[in-house]
Amino acid sequence: MRPVEPVRHPLWVRLTHWIGAGAFVALGVSGVAILLALPRLFWGETGANDAPAWIVLPLPVNLEQTGWGRNLHFLAAWIFVLSGALYLAAALVSGHLFRRLAPERDQLRPGHLARELRAHLRLRPSVPASGQERYNALQKLAYLAVLLVLAPVMLLSGLTMSPGVTAAYPELFTLFGGRQSARTVHFLAATLLVAFLLVHLWQVAANRPLRLLRGMITGRTGRTTEET
Amino acid sequence: MADISRRGWLVGASTLGLAPWLGGCEPIEGGPSRPGLYGLSDTLTLATQRFLLRDQPLAREFPADAISAVFPAINTTDPDDPAYKRSKDLEFADWKLPVTGLVERPGAFSLADLRAMPARTQVTLHSCEQGWSAIGGWTGVPLSHVLASCGLKPEARFIVIRTVDGWWDSYDLFDALHPQTILAYGMNGGDLPVAHGAPVRLRVERQLGYKSLKYLAGIEATDRVSGIGQGRGSMVSELGFSWYAGI
């Protein structure tokens, strides 16, 4: 009898992963649509077409994409935030965060990190994929940076652009140094998140993608890559 | 469709445990409707922000030296309307702002009438949905004062504002009666320039710039906006933007 593979990704991880993935794409596309109305970035409270910009992005100016862009952005933001909050709560309560995502002591030794870094730079898996029982340290650190740093920064800098929320919490302006600073931070953090997504997709593509995809969809990795 | 959207308001409000606070089963009866997922997302945003703003805080105000050197003027910057042009040539001496609808004493106010009322000056950050922001100083009379002096009837729920250039928008009393919601006739210490909505524009400081209409032509108090236009609550809503622009 064929042994049943242990469930690698619990249902709540898979659900929030794919809901978050869909919302993330919607946020990225609609975010660019919104940005096209003023593809210039500023620091401080104020900024406009006539004001000196910190960066002028090489994008076409288009004022007609703001309406649908904003609608989709805020709908997707609600979905992303609610499913992300659900994920974080479950990850904390179940111990997933510490068990799966926090690097273990041996993974943080300089020698180990250097080995992983070299393997990544040579585009080689740091440990044999078949015997992979845990995520590697760079992977864990990337996940934690997204979950605990970039996602909260995105949410807070986004809320700092809301005249309603900032009327209730003007501290947000102090946190980011002004509305335009928050807009710039929102863009920079979004850029880092897109960079994460590209590396994430590349890592999946480079490490037996069918097996990994099946794992994130069904929760089981199957016995071998080739079997369906 | 109206039923679905009404349910949307209720779902959004009750999800957040706000139904009692919003006043029973029909939080915004006669309010603007928007079908589908965007309606639900708008409702979640409105319900959440109403909860966060339940103590009616003021939007941040700045010292006068924070005023931006350049304040962009967008959309209409000089209405192409014969009556308006005539009025402008008279420095708006003949201009009147009618207040109608659910008020005890409908009337029309001249610029001098408004200037004689208690004034409020506020230096605030204007945030445009296009992404720009600028700091401006605004002087005017609180809308709440004008409405009170006309005797706003208890059944009034919304204030509809129409402009010279054909725009219209609506505000429920939560925002219409907020102290920073003013009919501004002054900007940065001088008269309100034509490009910024002379003789009088609205300032709604806790929402995006598109709610702060320029070139006011009339104010109407009503108990429902569901029957106006497409029932979306404003002209920009009919173009696909959110009626509530606190985000």
Image: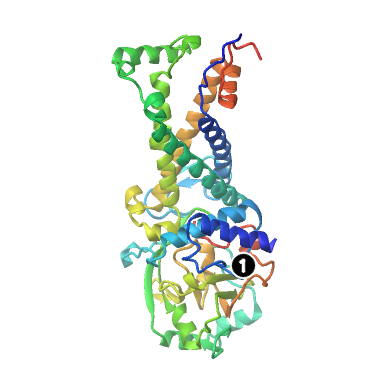
Q: Position of residue A189 (x, y in %)?
A: 43, 38
Q: Residue at x 64, y 57 (%)?
A: B240
Q: How is the image coloured?
A: rainbow
Q: Quadrant of residue A18?
A: top right
Q: Quadrant of residue A120?
A: top left
Q: Position of residue B132 (x, y in %)?
A: 48, 55
The N terminus of chain A sits in image quarter: top right
Q: Position of residue A151 (x, y in %)?
A: 43, 39
Where is B23 relative to A118, above or below? below
Q: Amino acid at mark 1?
A: Gly
Secondary structure of residue under mark 1: loop
Residue B243 visible to the viewer: yes
Q: Nearer the viewer, residue B126 or A162?
A: A162
Residue B129 visible to the viewer: no
Label 1 belongs to which residue? B233
Where is B230 relative to B120, above or below? above
The C terminus of chain A sits in image quarter: top right
Q: Position of residue B178 (x, y in %)?
A: 43, 72
Question: Quick one: label 1, few (<14), some, or many (20+) residues within 10 Å?
Answer: many
Q: Residue furthest front?
A: A1
Give me the chain letter of mark 1: B
Q: Nearer the viewer, residue B189 or A197?
A: A197
